[in-house]
Image (cartoon, rainbow, N blue to C red):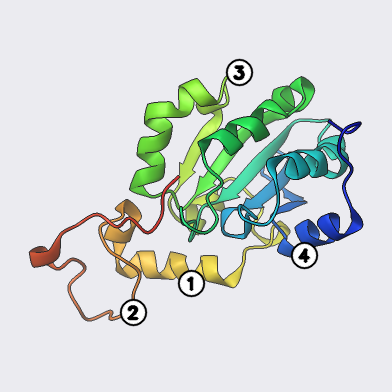
Amino acid sequence: MSEELSLSPEQEKLIKKLNVFKIKGRDKRGRKILRIIGKYFPARDLSVDVLNLYLEKKIFPKLQRPFAVVYIHTEVCKSENFPGISVLRSLYDSIPITVKQNLETVYFVHPDLQSRLFFATFGRFIFTGGLYGKLKYVSRLDYLWDHVQRNKIDIPEFVRDHDEDLEYRPMMDYGMESDHPRVYGAPAVDSSVAMYSTRCIS
């Protein structure tokens, strides 16, 4: 791929500015952390080939020892930043075998019902090589800190805000509510309008 396509300075600058991928911090087993923020994924702005090339040149060379991924799923929406199944499969297939072997755990932060169903149904078929078995769902940041050093990884403010919302409206975990202004004194679910949110999907 690197012979057929080059990464322009503008493309590289855009990916860095979006801050989708960042290697920083360690988990409590001493492994490097590759943090991925799904909301920032440039599904509409860059081709899968460009993303593959960026990972090949800028990220994979830094992952030559066992590492973990912290994937933040907060506010990922199908119409805006979900790249699609074929793109996910292409990105995964482009990972060198040595990097796949070094990947030991994927902490999936703020999974919703759709993402859980997606991985339960298709995960084993799309992500070969045992990745599905390395997936750990993390519904709250407090649970993430059981595995990751709290002050060594950057968490965006919108993720912290969403985490706080979940404390007051736990049914949002499973897509039973749409996001709306916080009304902490109101019932968690309106029984007369019980419907699944289609806001986000994985």
Mark 2 packing: few (<14 Cα in 10 Å), some, or many (20+)?
few
Percent position of residue 72, x then y: 56, 53
Badge 4 amino acid: Lys
10 Å crowding of disc 4: few (<14), some (14-19), many (20+): few
Residues at badges 1 and 2 in contact (C-beta under 8 Å)? Answer: no
Residue 1 in the image: above or below residue 72? above
What number is the disc on residue 129? 3
Task: List x then y, in percent, for residue 43.
Answer: 61, 52
Q: Residue 17 shows which numbered tag?
A: 4
Could you tell which of marks 4 and 3 lies nearer the N-terminus?
4
Q: Quadrant of the N terminus?
A: top right
- Image side of residue 175 versus residue 110, left or right: left
Q: What is the number of the mark on residue 161?
A: 1
Residue 34 relative to residue 59: left or right:
left
Q: Position of residue 55 (x, y in %)?
A: 79, 41
Task: Give the number of the disc on residue 182.
Answer: 2
Q: Report helix, strand or loop for mark 4.
A: helix
Q: Amino acid at mark 3?
A: Gly
Which one is earlier in the sequence, the residue at label 1 or at label 2?
Answer: 1
Question: Which residue in the rendered view is the most extreme toward the front?
Answer: 4
Tell me which amino acid carries mark 1. Asp
Q: CA distance from mark 1 to mark 4?
A: 22 Å
Disc 3: CA contacts within 10 A as few (<14), some (14-19) or many (>=20): few
Give me the residue at 60% from left, 18% from top: 129
Q: Residue at x 70, y 25 (%)?
A: 100
